[in-house]
Amino acid sequence: MELYVILILCLTALSVKSENIKKTPKQGPYLPNWDSIDSRPLPGWYDQAKFGIFMHWGVYSVPAFGTEWFWHKWKADKNPRFVEFMKENYPPNFQYPDFGSQFTAEMFDANHFADVIQASGAQYVVLTSKHHEGFTNYASNFSWNWNSVDIGPSRDLVGEMAEAVRSRTDIKFGLYYSLFEWFHPLYLKDAANNFSTQDYMKMVMKPQLHEIVNKYKPHLIWSDGDWMCPDTYWESTDFLAWLFNESPVKDYVVVNDRWGQGDSCHHGGYYTCSDRYNPGVLQKHKWENAMTIDKTSWGYRRDTSYKDFLTMDEITQTLAETISCGGNMLMNFGPTHDGRIIPIFEERLRQIGAWLKVNGEGIYASHPWTSQNDTFTPGVWYTTKNTSVYAIVLDWPENNTLNLGVPVTSETTTVHMLGVSTALQWSKGSQSGVSMTIQFPVLAGPQTACDYAWVLKMDNVN
């Protein structure tokens, strides 16, 4: 009986690993139903990557006001703030498509973008191929005169970015795609028919998904805009069966869970559940925290102040919480209409990259440990890799002394701080609830490897 209980506890602790997230996908064939689609193992590269960069870029970067949902806020919601903004700054007859010619991207250098993303330490990048406004960042055959080649930049922005990422880095290239378009006449017609017709799906959505897969061969498809109607309207399982059985990316492509009303957090590849999803506890299924450096907007906006952007303390905290609980973190920034990464976005990308250069050993290809966070000291999150346990300490301890309640030590236990060459001194805990006490080093100036969040590598602990 005792052996049985121990076995159950071990299986529970390793529940994330039991999701087949490290296996190579089977050959299939996969049938167009969720039981079959959901049985496909997630390609191992995704779980090992842990950290990616998201880029929301489109015509909404021209008004660059409030949110990437600008068009909807202005015309559908008739939000007074957005209505007044247009009255004060544009002629009376100005329409949202008029912004298209102003989306110029004349300063866009895909090589520079790829270099900055590489400096961030990201292992994958996801670029918007089309957001809910319907504008495609490539020459879509199903979006005439509302794409980045026919109007505005006169450039294949997706193609340039894919080429730069693949030629200059080892980063996996992925694409975001919105299933619906707010104001597309065919979509509005289908919606008026209570989605009993599928003209938009057949003539726009499905052909475009095949288009981006065949043309750009992404490692990841980040589907969105699914919530208005069931996946039977989108014919999502038909597309995914083709993707996993026949497409040129069938052996390595990863998808998320946004494929129809009610599917999020239940079906697909990895789960996103909601924007900025961060449950704070271990999940049984692989998941992703898609979050933004700008606290409220995914697209670039001009109406910001310094307090609107996450600090590095907040970013490293989110990363620690996410990775410790089995997730990946996908961190978003929005380029400007003329194709620039504004300084605060570039600064944050380079800062997290510098942090990962020191501490990535405890992040990349790691797994959740038996405990996700410490029971005595708040703000300590755990990961494990091989036989080592890593403690991500968000706050430098008072008097340089850290008390931990979870690790069980032995005479052979060793503790190192990543970025510091000498081992740290430790002792068994001397108060209730403390299993070990670690003495942090006295560091100053160039000796300090990081300014926020420090990672301890512990060997021979349980």
Image (cartoon, rainbow, N blue to C red):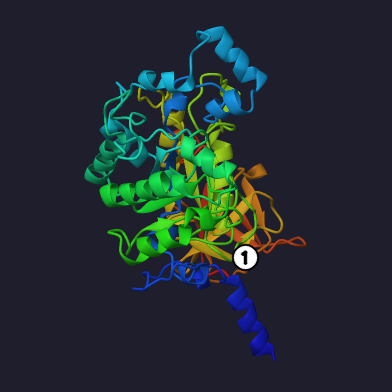
Residue type pointed to by label 1: Pro
Q: Report the side of 362 relative to 118 (left or right).
A: right
Residue at 42% across, 32% down: 57
Q: Report the side of 271 relative to 201 (left or right).
A: right
Q: Position of residue 145 (x, y in %)?
A: 33, 29
Give the SS element for disc 1: loop
Circle 1 residue: 407
Assess disc 1: are there few (<14), some (14-19) or many (≥20) residues with their C-alpha within 10 Å of its C-alpha. many
Outermost residue to the left: 167
Quarter in which the N terminus is drawn: bottom right
9 or 161: which is nearer to us?
Answer: 161
Q: Report the side of 49 relative to 417 (left or right).
A: left
185 or 300: which is nearer to us?
Answer: 185
Tell me where residue 309 sits by quadrant.
top right
Image: 336 above or below 286 = above
15 or 367: which is nearer to us?
Answer: 15
